Image (spheres, rainbow, N blue to C red):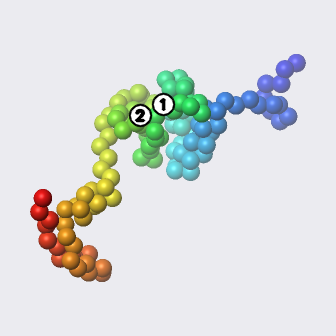
Amino acid sequence: MACKRGKGCRRHYSFGDVVLLRSIARLLNAGISVLRLKRALQSLRKHHPDITPDSLPGTHLITNGRKIYFRRGSHSVEELITGQFSFAFVVELEKVKSEVLKQLDVKTVRRNTGEFNYRVRSG
């Protein structure tokens, strides 16, 4: 008789299974309910089964504590349970700060207040 479940049974996991198991642990720590997590990850496996060492169908799992979203590259965000797509606009503040500093000639900075004297560079 083949051992299907329980203690002492050998388990076989794919690379994708291990990635998802670690993702589950992180989402559980973020407060996602087990039922929502189960539904979302069933949808992820059904629609995006290609998690391998050489392939990953997206870049992020995102949660607001209630819903779980799946982000593909820098483009679309999909709510996993419903499959509803939404748009995500992410502004990387460090990049904006660097762009501003490149345009300014900062003379003095007051660390406690955040005030600074500057002159706009020409060109």
Q: Is residue 120 above or below residue 91?
A: below
Residue 73 in percent (x, y) is at: 40, 36
Instruction: Tell me the quarter of the image containing the C terminus.
Output: bottom left
- Secondary structure of the residue carrying tag 1 is loop
Question: Which residue ends up furthest to the right in the rendered image?
Answer: 1
Image disc number at residue 99: none
Residue 87 in percent (x, y) is at: 30, 36
Q: Is residue 107 above or below residue 96?
A: below
Between marks 2 and 1, how big is the CA–CA gap? 7 Å
Residue with the mark numbered 2:
72
Report the front residue among 90 and 9: 90
Mark 1 crowd level (few <14, some 14–19, many ≥20, 10 Å Cα): some
Mark 2 crowd level (few <14, some 14–19, many ≥20, 10 Å Cα): some
> Exactly how many numbered labels are in the figure?
2
Residue with the mark numbered 1:
57
- 2 or 1: tag closer to the N-terminus: 1
Report the front residue among 64 and 111: 111
Report the front residue among 69 and 67: 69
Q: What amino acid type is highlighted by mark number 1?
A: Pro
